[in-house]
Amino acid sequence: MRQFFLLFMFSLQILWGIEVQAQTADNQAELEQAKQVAVQFLTAAREGRIDDAKRLVTATATDELQLQFKSDSQRLKAVPPPEFQFALPLKSKSFDPAEHEAQLVYASKQDGKWTTTTLRLYRYDNDPYRVEFWKVGDNEPNLFAMSDDPVLKKMPTIMLWIFLGMAAVGLILLFLILWLIRRKPRLVAPENEVERRVAAITRREEEAVE
């Protein structure tokens, strides 16, 4: 019975590992699809090709594209081509498995100044990804600062407090060890004179008995 249970648990671990690998592969494939569309959009914006950029945005983002395309295109033209930095975690995920979203950050640096573009892409079912939101700014790309996730945004502060807590515990243990060492009773060796006296008394008692 015990062997059957162990075999069952081992099988579950194998299946779980296969599932995790499959999900990782799916997520990577989704990311690559989103990145391809993002690069096409940014390239069209840098080159001033609004018609090509329009084909890469959602229907709800068309008006916004008309309004800000010229200024965004000028800003992107003035700096080197942006490079992919990271994908931002989504604040909330849809319960519909056919809906897919991605938030990507691209940036380039010139003369010590950053130009950072954040894009949010969306696709439904088997449709290709389309850009539904983008923003060109001058902030340095930072995963924690740019995330919508409140936990991730506070992660540097959380890690700092964890580090300080570990340092405090380490100091307390060090002081405790030093205190125990100082409090440890010391063994005092008996004096040789006392030993000689005891030996002499013992010999006299033995001689008296004889």
Image: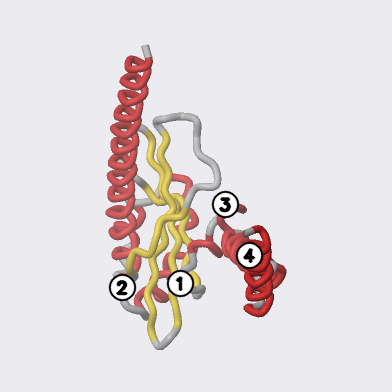
Give x and y (percent) for residue 64.
49, 57
Residue at 34 percent across and 45 percent down: it is: 129
How many residues crowd around disc 3 within 10 Å: few (fewer than 14), some, or many (20 or more)? some
Q: Are marks 3 and 1 in contact (CB under 8 Å)?
A: no
Which residue appears at 43% of the width and 86% of the height? 112
User: Which of disc 3 and disc 4 is earlier in sequence?
Assistant: 3
Please identify, in this view, whether the residue under mark 4 or under mark 2 is nearer the observer: 4
Q: Is residue 200 left or right of residue 69?
A: right
> Mark 4 belongs to which amino acid?
Glu
Q: CA distance from mark 4 to mark 2?
A: 108 Å
Q: Real-space Cα distance between discs 2 and 1?
A: 16 Å
Label 4 and label 3: CA atoms lie apart by: 94 Å
Q: Which residue bears the numbered disc 2?
A: 81
- Quick one: SS at disc 3? loop
Residue 76 visible:
yes
Label 4: which residue? 207
Q: CA distance from mark 3 to mark 2?
A: 28 Å
